[in-house]
Amino acid sequence: GKNIDQPTEMTATEGAIVQINCTYQTSGFNGLFWYQQHAGEAPTFLSYNVLDGLEEKGRFSSFLSRSKGYSYLLLKELQMKDSASYLCAVYNDYKLSFGAGTTVTVRA
Amino acid sequence: DGGITQSPKYLFRKEGQNVTLSCEQNLNHDAMYWYRQDPGQGLRLIYYSQIVNDFQKGDIAEGYSVSREKKESFPLTVTSAQKNPTAFYLCASSINPDTPGYTFGSGTRLTVV
C-alpha cells in the first residue's frame, strides 16, 4: 500500500521562504519527485531525490530522508508566480504515486 | 519537437455515453500512463503500459479501458460504467519503466452533463 501526506494549503509573503513537507509510507521506494502544477495545467518537474540529503536547484531545494520516510521542498525568495500546487510523488514498482498536493499562495 | 499530445483539451459528453481521450507521443518512450485528477486531489493512476500490446490496471481502473496497439498511442476510453467521470485527465510517458521521470501531456478536461 501507499500513503503520501502533505499539507493542504500554505500561505507566504513575496520574498519569503516556504517549506512544504511530505511524509510517505510505501511498500517500496525508488525515488521521490516534486512537481509544480498551476491550475488547469500539467505538472512540471521540479526535483528528484533518490539518495538522502539536500538537492539544490536555484531558488528550489529538496531534501530526502529515506529512514524517516520524509522529504521537504524549500522555496526561497518567493515570487507571485510561485503560487501553485506542489505535488510530492514516490516512484516505486515502475510508476509514480502522488500525494494530494499543497496549494501555496504567495501574497504581496 | 518531441512531446506528448492530448486531445481535445476540453470535452463534453452526455451521461451514459462512452468517450475516448487521445494521447500520442513522439518521444519513442516505452512506458505510458493515464492519471485522473479531481479538484483538491492528487493524481490517481488509472492504467499504465510498460510496452506495446501490454497494459496493467492502476488504482482506479473500474469504468475505464485502454489499448496499446502502437508505441506512440495510448487512448483511454471512459465508459458509461464510470460513475463519476467528470475530471481532469493527464497522460504521461517515460523512456522505459526502469527510468523514473515523466513527460506529461497538457491534459483533457472531461465534463459529463
Image: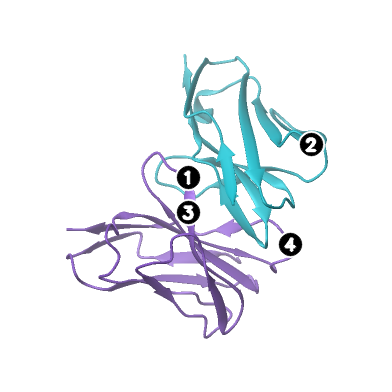
The residue that appears at 28% across and 69% down in the rendered structure is: B81
Pointer 4 and pointer 1 on the same chain:
yes
Distance between the alpha carbons at the discs numbered 3 and 1: 6 Å
Left or right of B102 in this view: B62: left
Query: Quarter of the image holding residue B77?
Result: bottom left
Residue B42 is marked as 1
Helix, strand or loop under label 3: strand
Q: Which amino acid does label 3 sit on?
A: Arg
Give the residue at mark 3. B44
Left or right of A76 in this view: A56: right
Q: Which chain is cyan?
A: A
Give the residue at mark 4. B99
Query: In the figure, B103 relative to A74: above or below?
Result: below
Query: In the figure, A36 relative to B22: above or below?
Result: above
Residue A67 is marked as 2
Helix, strand or loop under label 2: loop
Pointer 3 and pointer 4 on the same chain:
yes
Question: Is disc 1 surrounded by few (<14), some (14 to 19) or many (20+) residues within 10 Å?
Answer: many
Distance between the alpha carbons at the discs numbered 2 and 3: 26 Å
Helix, strand or loop under label 4: loop
